[in-house]
Image (cartoon, grey):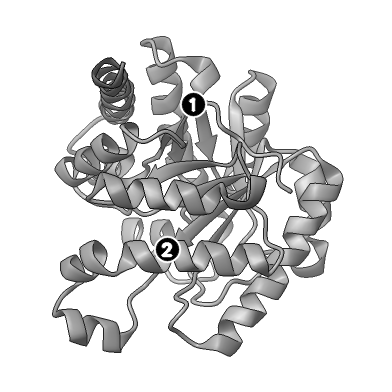
Amino acid sequence: MPRGYDRPLYLLPFDHRGSFRSKLFGWTPPLDAAQAAQMTDAKRVVYDGFRAALDAGVPRDRAGILVDEQFGADILREAAASGVVTACPAEKSGQPEFQLEYGDDFAQHIEAFDPTFCKVLVRYNPAGDRALNRRQADRLKRLSDFLAHRQRSRFMFELLVPAEPAQLERLGDRSAYDRELRPRLMVETIGELQNAGVEPDLWKLEGLDRREDARAIVAAARAGGRDHVGCIVLGRGADQRKVRDWLAVAAGVPGFIGFAVGRTDFWDPLVAWRAGTATREQSVAEIARRYHAFVDLFEGRQVATVGRDS
């Protein structure tokens, strides 16, 4: 049974590797040393925005970062030394099938950085390729078992449920799929993975449009005595209005403890910095402002919901 994690958590994720390389910089692998240094510097801009938000009042005990070892090793160490919640990805970036970034050496990398959370990103549709789903579940169980035995880093599971072509064809478009089918598939996926022995402490999940769907997700995540397992909402790179809608839904549901919003916070400021239309200081300040605004929104919605329910 997982230990769970049910304390408030407002995560700023910038563990993106493939999208940074190809979409922000326009590069193809392999990177040379100068290019890798620029990737690292871009991560530092985001981290400086996070620190500026802490200085501006975001609660330190509720804040955290998610950054990769490849370009953010120093950031992970600095954040951990300052008492900030840290999360580090274990998956290879941009792969349709979950693969461990460091293969059989995954344990040594987790132990070297000792993050608060070891995070995986997994694409899993229960109506999809069954053999692929089984392969992924087997790899994930291995990691889950290691983390449970080690009892230091908790297990954060980022679940994406991409639509199968037949599902999109039946429903007409992605928005209908997101609203009418994806929530049920998320519940089904959580159950399948639990039955396969995959036991996250925290689920990082796509946003939901209806509170009843969010309640069903929490019930699935906490089924069978998993009472302290938490859920957070991911941003999926959506615009600020859509992310605010998702956070407003989740904040009213016990078990949804926070969010992990990355690109919506940092992408435009980084593009402006790279283009020379904003200074580094301006981009840092804008990242801090956006992140802080989402924290204020989530906490405010939680307070309002408690007030109505009491």
Identify the residue at image location x=86%, y=49%: 149
Q: Is residue 36 visible?
A: no
Instruction: Please say if 44 is above or below 23.
Output: above
Instruction: Please say if 33 is above or below 98.
Output: above
Instruction: Please say if 223 is above or below 121.
Output: above
Residue 15 image point, x, y percent: 50, 49
Identify the residue at image location x=56%, y=47%: 222
Residue 92 image point, x, y percent: 59, 66
Label 2 or label 1, whichever lies nearer to me, is 2
Q: Is residue 239 visible?
A: yes
Quarter containing the C terminus: top left
Viewer-proximal residue among 215 and 167: 215
Question: Label 1 is placed on what type of residue?
Answer: Pro
Numbered circle sitting on residue 18: none
Mark closer to the chain start, 2 or 1: 1
According to the picture, the residue beneath numbered tag 2 turns out to be 186
Binning the other alpha carbons within 10 Å of mark 2 as few (below 14), some (14 to 19) or many (20 upward) gives many
